[in-house]
Amino acid sequence: MSKTDTFVKFLVDSGALKFGDFVTKSGRNTPYFINTGEFRTGASLSKLAEFYAEAFVEHFDGRAENLYGPAYKGIPLCAATAMKLSDVHAKNLSFTYNRKEVKDHGEGGSLVGYKYAEKTNVVIIEDVITAGTSVNETMQALKNIENANVIGLLISVDRKEKLENGKSALQTVQEEYGIEAYSIVNINDIIAFLEKEENRKAINAPEGILDKVYAYREMWGAK
């Protein structure tokens, strides 16, 4: 099984990728849904972090010193990825995450973890990107933090859905902010997985799901 097929099956087995009838935050009816909040055991989060760490090494090795995890789902993702980078790849990166509400006592502020005491190259760790709303909020927050130099974004799944500009959220983020953005897999990888009958049987995929995903990609997919 290819690396991408292995990750897709892992998402399904963990309950993070489901097939059926769902509605996205943007109001679109979709035949598949991704929720990394389903990674709720030590074993599943550890395995997920392995994939993130491998992707980080592939795309950003030697170019970033810090991982930033936006509250809330990005917090465990960036912490676990930092641990895997240290334990498996011998790369000791700092990590930072934000509070939703600014703390007005103690040390105060909205950041927890590394506070960017010096110029630092940052990679944002997120779960899934559809419209890019969360990433835009993160970029707006980080641009006001001295010494935080965002160079990239790493996510688990890119749905590759087109925005009003006809481009995907990942493409738009890259162009608007001048950063590199990568996903572990994207919708095309999920389709390639579903195209194999043995894979559909292995995950007990709903009847006709491949055609539904094809149709959804045709209607909402960016190039």
Image: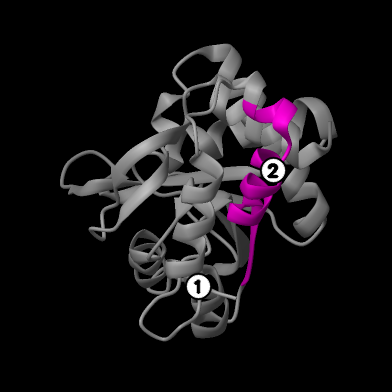
Q: Secondary structure at mark 1?
A: loop
The residue carrying mark 1 is 168
Q: Quadrant of residue 33?
A: top left
Query: Which of the pair 113/14 is nearer the observer?
Result: 14
User: Residue 47 in the image: x percent, y percent?
Assistant: 66, 23
Indicate whether residue 85 is drawn in magenta.
no
Q: Is residue 147 above or below residue 197?
A: below
The residue carrying mark 2 is 195
User: Residue 193 in the image: x percent, y percent?
Assistant: 69, 40
Q: Is residue 13 left or right of residue 100?
A: right
Q: Quadrant of residue 3?
A: top right
Image quarter hosting the C terminus: bottom right
The residue depicted at 50 percent of the width and 78 percent of the height is: 172
- How crowded pointer 1 is (Cα within 10 Å; few <14, some 14-19, many 20+) is rated as many
Residue 124 visible at all: yes
Query: Which of the pair 179/215 is nearer the observer?
Result: 215
Image quarter hosting the N terminus: top right
The residue depicted at 70 percent of the width and 36 percent of the height is: 51
Q: Is residue 105 above or below residue 214?
A: above
Magenta highlight range: 180-200
User: Residue 125 in the image: x percent, y percent?
Assistant: 54, 49
Q: How many marks?
A: 2
Q: Is residue 89 left or right of residue 49?
A: right
